[in-house]
């Protein structure tokens, strides 16, 4: 008789980092039951040499300088202005693309890119959001935008309460995450999808990014300029009352 076994995969506790990687969070992922018969697809990671010291948080000026240097040494062709606008995409596709990296277990690595059906994108926080939004990606931009340049493709929202699934929460100096919904009816904690830091894989978090943490650490809410549709059905916490948790309250709400 063929037995289908089930195992529990528990992520080890995160290690807090400092400096450019200060977005690291010191908490452990919850254990996730995984059926042996439903093994994750292996990510296709390829290491590369970035044109800047930190492709995760580099500024536009740093990228321009780095690209000019790369052109001199390897004839790298810079991106055209037309290639920096992005393309239309629905919220449901944004979320499906993000969830696919979580299912694949794509590891964080700012010096590597992952190639799959979503395209080729750098395996860090800003590469993850670039991938979810299906932004242009090539050697010229180190296979994804940065925490600072993602805002060129988005518009800042008036309030955290305006967030809808597929929007981003961005601290341009340190880290960026993709918003999924609210973990509680009072909207005190955001559910997010992210590539966090070295030693972790793409994941979902529903307890670390409290409203107070987001405000204290200067995370701002943004919406991709070419998002195509309204929010998908309300995201609810199965352990909470089944009220709406992800629907925005309209621009101007505080």
Image (cartoon, rainbow, N blue to C red):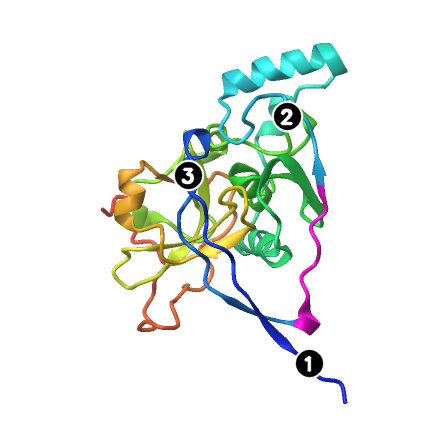
Tally of marks: 3
Residue 11 pos. (x, y %): 51, 58
Q: Earlier in the sequence, mark 3 or mark 2?
A: 3
Q: Quadrant of the N terminus?
A: bottom right
Secondary structure under badge 1?
loop
Residue 51 pos. (x, y %): 63, 21
> 173 left or right of 38?
left
At a point 60% along the width and 22% down the height, the residue shown is: 81
Q: Is residue 159 visible?
A: no
Q: Are marks 1 and 3 in contact (CB under 8 Å)?
A: no
Name the outermost residue toward the left. Answer: 254
At a point 29% along the width and 45% down the height, the residue shown is: 213
Q: Is residue 200 visible?
A: yes
Residue 119 against residue 203 in the figure, above or below: above
Q: Which mark is residue 23?
A: 3
Q: Which residue is mark 1?
A: 4
At a point 58% along the width and 13% down the height, the residue shown is: 65
Q: Which residue is mark 2?
A: 50
Residue 234 against residue 208 in the figure, above or below: below
Residue 17 pos. (x, y %): 43, 37
Highlighted magenta segment, given as a residue range: 36-45
């Amino acid at each position: 008789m063929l037995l289908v076994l089930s195992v529990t995969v528990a992520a080890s506790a995160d290690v807090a980092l400092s400096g450019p990687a200060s977005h690291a969070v010191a908490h452990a992922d919850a254990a996730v039951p995984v059926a042996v018969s439903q093994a994750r697809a292996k990510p296709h990671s390829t290491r590369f040499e970035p044109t800047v010291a930190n492709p995760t948080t580099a500024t536009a000026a740093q990228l321009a300088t780095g690209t000019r240097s790369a052109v001199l040494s390897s004839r790298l062709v810079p991106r055209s202005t037309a290639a920096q606008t992005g393309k239309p995409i629905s919220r449901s596709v944004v979320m499906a693309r993000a969830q696919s990296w979580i299912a694949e277990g794509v590891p964080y690595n700012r010096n590597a890119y992952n190639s799959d059906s979503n395209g080729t994108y750098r395996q860090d926080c800003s590469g993850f959001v670039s991938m979810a939004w299906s932004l242009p990606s090539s050697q010229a931009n180190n296979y994804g935008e940065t925490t600072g340049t993602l805002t060129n493709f988005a518009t800042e929202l008036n309030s955290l309460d305006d967030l809808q699934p597929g929007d981003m929460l961005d601290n341009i100096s340190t880290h960026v995450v993709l918003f999924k919904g609210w973990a509680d009816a009072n909207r005190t904690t955001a559910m997010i999808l992210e590539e966090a830091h070295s030693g972790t894989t793409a994941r979902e978090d529903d307890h670390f990014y409290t409203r107070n943490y987001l405000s204290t650490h200067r995370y701002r809410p943004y919406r991709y300029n070419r998002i195509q549709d309204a929010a998908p059905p309300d995201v609810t916490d199965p352990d909470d009352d089944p009220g709406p948790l992800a629907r925005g309250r309209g621009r101007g709400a505080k």
